[in-house]
Image: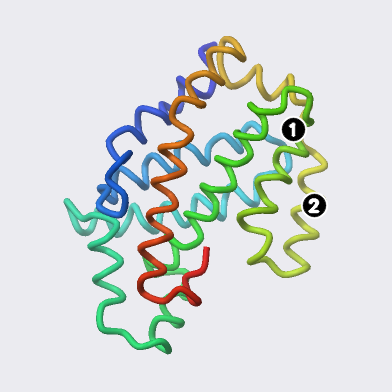
Amino acid sequence: MPGWLQDSKVLEKFEPSLGKKEEADAKQFAEASLALISVFDLITGMGMASADMSGNANTLLKAANANPGSTLKSLIDAECAGKDAAALKKIAGDGKTVSCALLWLARALNFIIKMLEELIANPGKKLSDCVLAGYEVSLKPHHGMMIRTTFSVGVKAAPYRDAFVAKLGPSEEEVFGAIKGKQADMSELVKSVQGYLKTKDPTIFAD
């Protein structure tokens, strides 16, 4: 079997968006995000997290399909332009808006990118520890105690590192080499989206 990296075509799907920052095509970004999130299909215990992340990506995809040719910036602007702090806070807390979906989707993508970064940089590190490392710097600061506890319980079901890596592709060297080559650009893309959201209000749209 080719493995997740080839089956998901995640790197190919991200390629058109890299370097475009918030001007990335919204539909392409959403589809690439769904491909990256699908890595959690390989990790037992991450079903709830994956469903939540996919929900945000699909909210973006639905808006993109309703507005052909839209960029992340144009969709954010359409919702946020001219709004005061109270209105922006409402938008950021409404799971049906593009801005709210992107706020949480960007945090989720940072989570996955950091998890993979830890996995690649630390050959002896357990998969569950890599998952936790990604969670610590992305979603955890924005979660309440109940969700944090649920996540901690879920991650304990993560498979052994070797079993997970074997599902990614034909060899660790090939898969990690390909991912590592795009990591910085993917991270920069996500940070640029977060940065643009923060231009609307840095407190409400904190990353």
Residue 204 vs 14, above or below: the answer is: below
Whether tag 2 and tag 1 are in contact, CB under 8 A, the answer is no
Residue 91 vs 179, above or below: the answer is: below
Residue 81 vs 133, above or below: the answer is: below
Q: Position of residue 202 (x, y in %)?
A: 45, 73
Q: Say whether residue 206 is left or right of residue 165.
A: left
| Secondary structure found at label 2 | helix
Closer to us: 43 or 185: 185
Work out how far the residue at label 2 is from the one at label 1, CA to CA, in angstroms: 13 Å
Q: Residue at x 35, y 88 (%)?
A: 84
Q: Where is the N terminus found, in terms of image quarters? A: top right
Label located before the other in sequence (2 or 1): 1
**What residue would you read off at disc 2?**
152
| Secondary structure found at label 1 | helix
Decide: few, some or many residues near mark 1? Use Cα within 10 Å; few <14, some 14-19, many ≥20.
many
Decide: few, some or many residues near mark 2? Use Cα within 10 Å; few <14, some 14-19, many ≥20.
some
Q: Residue at x 59, y 10 (%)?
A: 171
Q: Position of residue 49 (x, y in %)?
A: 63, 51
The extreme left residue here reads: 69
Closer to us: 74 or 56: 74
How many numbered circles does the render carry?
2
Q: Residue at x 65, y 17 (%)?
A: 166
Q: Amino acid at mark 1?
A: Leu
Q: Say whether residue 158 is left or right of residue 4.
A: right
Q: Say whether residue 205 is left or right of residue 50.
A: left
Q: Amino acid at mark 2?
A: Ser
Residue 106 vs 201, above or below: the answer is: above
Quadrant position of residue 133: top right
**What residue would you read off at disc 1?**
127
Q: Position of residue 3 (x, y in %)?
A: 54, 18
Q: Residue at x 68, y 35 (%)?
A: 43
- The numbered dot on residue 173 is none
